[in-house]
Amino acid sequence: MSASHVFLEVKDLNVAYGKIQVLWDISFKVYKGEIVALVGSNGAGKTTTLKTIMGLIKPLSGSITFEGKRIDGRPTTEIVRMGITLVPEGRQLFPELSVYDNLLAGAYLIKDKEEIKRRLEFVYKIFPVLEERKKQKAGTLSGGEQQMLAIGRALMSMPKLLMFDEPSLGLMPKLVDAILDTIASLKREGITILLVEQNVRAALEISDRGYVIENGRIILEGKSGELLESERIKKAYLAI
Amino acid sequence: MKAVLEVHSVTKSFGGLIAVNNFSMEVREREIVGLIGPNGAGKTTLLNLVTGFLKPDKGRIVFMGEEITGLPPHKICIKGVARTFQLIKPFPKLSILDAIAVGALVRVRSKVEAYKRAHEVIEFLGLKNPHRLCESLNVVEEKLVELGRALATNPKLLLIDEIAAGLRPSEVEDIKRVIRVIRDEYNVSIVVVEHVMPLVMGVSDRIVVMSSGSKVTEGKPEEVASNPKVISIYLGERRGRMLGVKS
């Protein structure tokens, strides 16, 4: 693909928490229409990368470009408005609010009531169960339904790039499959996806390309199918 | 080889969550054992059980042939078990020398003796300028002081909890060397709890893999790394079917 299709570009990103540097010269690209998996073991720096893209953490150095515009250093609301949304790890719903109100919270930057209605219909089409349970408190949903709500809430902001942080965490295997199927189907809706996942094999199976991050550095990258078959990925994880 | 530490069928629950489930392992004299597993596997809980920070619901912990199950941490420390913490516990307003002497005071009564011991440890670890305050240290020095304080207690068993987090690869290599030299020079047995695989796979004689509170397998690093169960724990299971999304 040509450079003009680069949607998100992270370049030489360095991030520290106090004295501890956690990201070292992280560089990767996401092309329009792709699912890109960012995988790595605990503490590798995956969540930090996502938070930095969202403007929740200020990098020491490096740049983040989205649709040709620099976004590093911009406030999070502006980044969301530009079309990037995060489905955070652990879902971070408002448990005491209804399903419906949780969804509306995702559309807080959208002022057009008709647009909000259209987005709701879109979300209900993908997750019919959320419509059935729209009056129920979010905290009373099952784990899988809560993950659907978290994704639904993110979709309400009309993202062009949707980022997932460990969407399969804490879900039983059957639901993991359902959530990953959903993510794959969002690609068909024209949404570009950056997927952070602990389940490396599953993440590589639904993605186009993958990056392996270890101790804050990208140590491996390639087409997902090739990474999946590669011995190097095992070595990347187990160092042997 | 004699067992220094024996963990027999230990179980520990927090409410409904079984953090450590009927877990057994042993550490032999002068052995370096790596304890690995995903987040939430129960590794730190196990260290907390061995060091007396937590009491097991079931099972026995034996150190040098003597049961230590349920003893308070300071008694276990005096018997010869020392640890470092994942989130290091520095004394920011103490000097390197004083911070390490605190560890020595577990073993010796006089300050003179404690400082003597602290100086030995500082020299051994190669820490420069020991009158600097702990708050002024860089990350590697902080970790060395954490190790030094534990070493100053003159342990027979040293438990090291995620010391490599936040270090560069070259620093990880340095710490790897330090751990080996500690074993060789101080004749201690060491348990390394670690996510940073180049460290734990490189330094350990034997690896114990823990997941969801239970032991998955144990063996030499290369045996463990080629075990399909271990690979699945780290890389996840493949999905039953392929989706038609990849072109």
Image (cartoon, coloured by chain):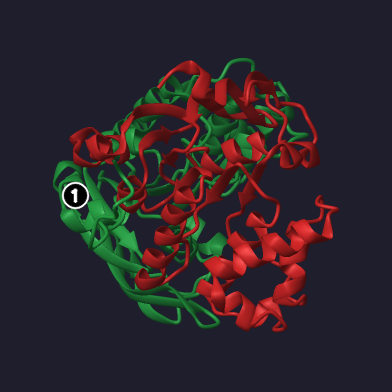
Chain colours: A red, B green
Q: Quadrant of residue A9?
A: top right
The reply, left or right, for residue A176 in relation to residue B34 is: right
Taking the spot 31% from the left edge, 71% from the top edge, the residue there is: B23
**A154, above or below B62, in the image:** above
- Across and down, in percent, residue B172 comes to 42, 27
Q: Position of residue A31 (x, y in %)?
A: 48, 30
Q: Circle 1 — which element?
A: helix
**Residue B228 point in image, percent of width and height:** 17, 55
Residue corresponding to mark 1: B224
Q: At x 60% / y 23%, what residue is drawn?
A: A14
Res. B186 visible in picture: no
Q: Using the image as rendered, state which of residue B168 and residue A75 is in the foreground.
A: A75
- Side of A222 relative to A35 (left or right): left
Q: How many marks?
A: 1
- Letter of the chain that mark 1 sits on in the rendering: B
> Which quarter shows the C terminus of chain A?
top left
For residue B118, side relative to residue B41 (left or right): right
Compared to B58, does A79 lie above or below? above
Q: Which quadrant of the structure image shows residue A108? A: bottom right
